Amino acid sequence: MSIPLHAGTENCVGPEKGEITPAFEKQSDELVSRYPVSKRSAVLPLLHLWQETFGYIGPRGVEWIAKKLSLQEIQVLELVTFYPWFRQKPYGKFHFRVCRTLPCALGGAGKTFAALQKLMNLKSDGHEGAMVSEDGRFSLEYSECLASCGTAPVVLRNDEFYEKVDEKRASDLVTGCR
Amino acid sequence: MNPWNHDVAKDEKDLVDVQVDGVWMQMPRGLNVVEVAHRAQKFIPHYCYHPKLSVVGNCRMCLFEMGTPKMGPDRKPVLGADGKPEIAWMPRPQIGCATNITPGMGIRTDSALVKDCRNGVMEFLLINHPLDCPICDQAGECKLQEYSVEYGTGASRFVENKVKKPKNVDLGERIVLDDERCILCSRCIRFSSEVMKDDVLGFVNRGSHSTLTAYPGKSFDNAYSLNTADICPVGALTSKDFRFQMRVWFLKETKSLCASCGTGCNVTIGSREGKVHRLTPRENEAVNSQWMCDFGRLNFHYLESKDRLHRPLLRAAGEQFPGTWADAIQRSVDGLKKVKPEEIAVVASSRLTLEELFVLKRLLAELGVNRVDTVPNPGQADNFLRSGDGNPNSRGTELLGLSSGGRKLGSWGTEIESGKIKALFVLGGEDLIASGLPASTLAKLDLLIASGILTNETTRLAHVVLPGAAFAEKTGSMVNVHGRLQRMTRAIAAPGEAREEWTILRDLRMALTGGNSFHSVEDVWKSMAAEVSQLSGLNWARIGDLGIQIESVAQAAGVKAG
Ligand code: SF4
Ligand code: SF4
Ligand code: FES
């Protein structure tokens, strides 16, 4: 009945296409019911649920959640844009996060990032946020501290964690995607 | 009712001892430190704090040094040599907007630490600021400018690149946003959500990229949106109507009223060289607090309309020609003398001031004219300030017995047709044709005199047209729908030969009946106070800038309904 919780995007069908199933409704209602004092508090759990189900949070998600919690859309959008974990566009099937906080930056995160970018054939559009490959297979972005400074540089591939990712390891990670 | 009102004490008599910059004094319990400092003639600079909105404490400009009474081992305050409690100062500053006073609290608003804090906050606020004061409408009334001068260093140490943000963002029909100027105080968001219940504004993104925005696809154009341009401490939100029109330091400020509905919001008229550039709300807790509606705020451009009546007009050979005031008065007098008093009908106007109406009342009494009424002007009431009465002074006409709420007016058409009414005097720019009288009926009159501001169908048919003054061009008083008597003051002169109606009526009266007792507004008030029971004991000066309640709100409502 319940929808598996994971950070990857394998199950992503795209919010504009994805169907809001009775199971999804039920799970959201259950999340809302955990906050009897103020259902506004359910906004973060619902955002996670939406992203886990549909891959990203577009206007449809923002509006659906706002309606569910009797909020205004802007109040939901504020949160979506505040937390880097939430995304407003579809990412690749395999999403890479490279830590760029100081220890990783000193440990060579820049080189790792450049290697991944080359391997995935990604072009930067000069903006903050993730780059996505044309075929939708890969996406890549920097993140802040992933809490493993002793094994810098570190990388998250979907929700799998990798340590000491030098250029060689980076290449293994990309080829290991299937 | 505003749930915040931080500047209003719950009980002015429930006092606690506090020390402000070394001086012990008593202040009402529950006030916050910004308000207490203000009452102590000190000033704590602040951006996000606004007395009519919730407290968020996000700008940190109001930092002050706080202390509490030193306690002895007996848990009693330690007294100093002066017999007053000694204060233990906290090492870290506190924010004044979110700190309410407690008994014995010490407050320092001008210590070295406090000055240092303000300097630091100013430096942070200016890091990404575009410094485009020369082209910014807020310049001259900008808190960022003022506090920079007062509390900043004057020079920037920032050599990195500034964050770029959207400029010239069209937020809605009347407001433009410059995100680079926004200091993220959230006053506009709180006004929209708490006062207007219209949440479309919010901050997106994070840190130095935080950006004020309206939800994509929605526009920020509620009926009170322009109040955010007033409370925005910087030039981020500007009024499309006012921007790039006039530097604010050139504006002459005149205390007056909005005359666009029966609420009579208190306003400040900003004018320069005979031109009104803007209206801004003037605080009056009994009427409009610090707000006004966008409609009333922008409803002054007709002052410069090309339809403005500038000179008296006299009809001859089927056409209207400009004439002198002397001719216009003479022609009116001659015409009115030719008919009997019971053949005269007068449309007084709830747009006129009490003073004007009183001179009219005198004149009609002296002539023996009884047929007088006003044209109702129903407007769209909202649940906030806007009244369902589109006239600013309906209560005034009722008070002086010059109105039957339009009930008499109904039969005048037939009475003109049957020759019972031969002369009609229409004041205040009322347009009888627009309110349903056929032009062919008005054409049957021996004499039609019309005074007003703009040309309309009725003035076009008149034998004599008397050009009058608009609200910003005259001094006088009005009674709002809640029974509050309030003053308006002339900001600019009426254009051309147009004149305040009370002087027109005064001259007409002198020529018609010889009555010449009114030479000033004060003279009018003397007679009026003696004659109208609700005004007894009052005079022009006593009304004051904030007006005076002459009937209870319930009374005023009751008379209206009845
Ligand atoms: S636009 Fe003005 S009022 Fe709104 S958050 Fe920015 S600075 Fe404050
Ligand atoms: S509510 Fe009425 S008086 Fe107040 S600003 Fe609007 S139109 Fe003018
Ligand atoms: S005014 Fe107190 S923190 Fe902004």
Image (cartoon, rainbow, N blue to C red):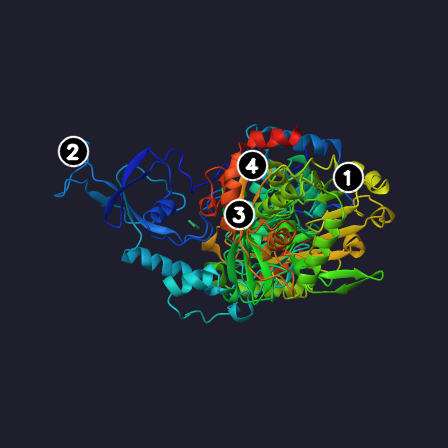
Per the image, the residue denoted by label 2 is B73
Per the image, the residue denoted by label 1 is A19
Residue B410 located left or right of residue B558: right
**Which residue is at 69% across, 58% downward?**
B330
Q: Is disc 3 surrounded by few (<14), some (14 to 19) or many (20+) residues within 10 Å?
A: many
Q: CA distance from mark 2 to mark 4?
A: 60 Å
Circle 1 or circle 2, nearest the eye: 2
User: Which labelled disc corresponds to residue A119?
Assistant: none
Question: Which one is nearer the viewer's eye here, A102 or B68?
Answer: B68
Q: Is disc 4 surrounded by few (<14), some (14 to 19) or many (20+) residues within 10 Å?
A: many
Question: Which one is nearer the viewer's eye here, B253 or B170?
Answer: B253
Figure quarter occupied by ligand 1 = bottom right
Q: Chain of mark 4?
A: B
Q: CA distance from mark 2 to mark 3?
A: 71 Å
Q: Residue furthest left?
A: B81
Q: Which amino acid does the dot numbered 2 rest on?
A: Pro
